[in-house]
């Protein structure tokens, strides 16, 4: 990370909370390896384009793909890791009151609909603090942006995978990440690593708080997202690469996890 980028990152991180009542806006290409772990008193609306962004919060790694946004409540420590330095990060930071909707107090990843994207595009002209009595028209629009989020964002997508602590499970997870063909089953994993199906199920549940099938399905869909963004392979090829012999099954699973079908995702991922 060069000195200019360090300065730029420190600038915007220290400016967010300088005026507690303002809405703070910051749009910029990340152009660095990562944004260091930090927290702020305001909640964060994070939208990125040009790649996938990984947001680390505690023991979980959240995957934020194109055409989706992440809501990060106040005081939550997190770091931001783009998969490519050309990712453009669009941020709006909002003061949160105790009386606000419970939506604003939970971490979540949601599809960004057309209305949000239009408002986000409009916010390109904003930079820094937007204050109620100083920038009245901008403040009204930004406040409306915040207010509509719970109404258009009903279901948070499960785009997070916990990091295993158990050394045996770390090896299994790496094996799954390296092998996504259709022959990978729980039975094959138990034979490969010398577990019974029952003990392997217990290990996944105890360490990761999810089943083997849940973990592997999300892992496959996240890999599919990366491949779709690269635009090197067709959807049919990607389906096979992540272990699905049936394209309809892959498409249905993708929609369930990501919120849209692969074809729709490709059409809209660069909408801004």
Image (cartoon, helix red, strand yellow):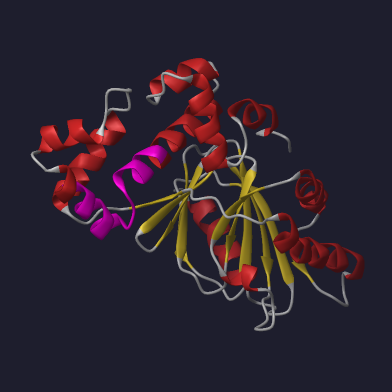
Left/right placement of residue 3 relative to residue 88 reads: left
Left/right placement of residue 88 relative to residue 148 reads: left
- Of 164 and 90, nearer the camera is 164
Q: State the residue at coordinates (76%, 50%).
A: 116
Seen in the picture, residue 171 relative to 23 is either above or below; the reply is above
The percent coordinates of residue 129 (x first, y second) are: 74, 68
Specify the principal SS of the magenta part. helix
The percent coordinates of residue 110 (x first, y second) are: 62, 51
- Of 137 and 4, nearer the camera is 137
- Please tell me how many numbered marks the rendered image carries: 0
Q: State the residue at coordinates (61%, 54%).
A: 155
Q: Quadrant of residue 40?
A: bottom right
- The quadrant the C terminus occupies is top right
Left/right placement of residue 30 relative to residue 140 reads: left
Left/right placement of residue 179 relative to residue 12 reads: left
**Residue at the extreme front of the image, as rendered:** 198
The percent coordinates of residue 95 (x first, y second) are: 68, 75
Q: Quadrant of residue 136?
A: bottom right
Q: State the residue at coordinates (54%, 20%).
A: 235
Inspect the magenta stretch and tell me whether residue 149 lies in it. no
The percent coordinates of residue 178 (x first, y second) are: 28, 30
**Residue at the extreme right of the image, as rendered:** 137
Inspect the magenta stretch and tell me whether residue 209 lies in it. yes
Magenta segment: 200-217
Whether residue 233 appears in this view of the structure is no
Whether residue 24 appears in this view of the structure is yes
- Of 28 and 210, nearer the camera is 210
Seen in the picture, residue 187 relative to 39 is either above or below; the reply is above
Q: State the residue at coordinates (85%, 62%).
A: 141
């Amino acid at each position: 990370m060069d000195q200019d980028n360090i300065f730029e990152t420190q600038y915007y991180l220290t400016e967010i909370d300088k005026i507690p009542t303002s809405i703070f806006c910051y749009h910029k290409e990340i152009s660095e390896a990562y944004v260091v772990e930090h927290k702020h008193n305001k909640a964060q609306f994070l939208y990125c384009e040009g790649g996938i962004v990984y947001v680390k919060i505690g023991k979980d790694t959240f995957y934020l793909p194109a055409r989706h946004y992440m809501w990060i409540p106040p005081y939550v420590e997190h770091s931001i890791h783009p998969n490519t330095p050309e990712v453009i990060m669009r941020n709006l930071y909002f003061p949160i009151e105790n009386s606000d909707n419970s939506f604003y107090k939970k971490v979540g990843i949601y599809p960004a609909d057309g209305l949000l994207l239009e408002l986000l595009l409009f916010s390109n002209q904003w930079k820094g603090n937007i204050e109620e009595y100083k920038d009245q028209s901008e403040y009204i629009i930004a406040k409306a942006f915040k207010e509509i989020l719970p109404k258009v964002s009903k279901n948070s997508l499960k785009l997070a995978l916990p990091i295993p602590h158990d050394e045996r499970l770390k090896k299994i997870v790496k094996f799954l990440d390296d092998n996504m063909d259709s022959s990978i089953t729980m039975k094959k994993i138990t034979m490969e690593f010398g577990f019974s199906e029952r003990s392997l199920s217990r290990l996944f549940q105890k360490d990761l708080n999810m089943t083997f099938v849940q973990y592997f399905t999300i892992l496959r869909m996240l890999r599919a997202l990366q491949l779709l963004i690269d635009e090197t392979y067709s959807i049919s090829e990607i389906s096979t690469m992540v272990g699905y012999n049936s394209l309809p099954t892959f498409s249905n699973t993708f929609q369930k996890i990501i919120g849209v079908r692969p074809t729709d995702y490709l059409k809209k991922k660069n909408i801004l």
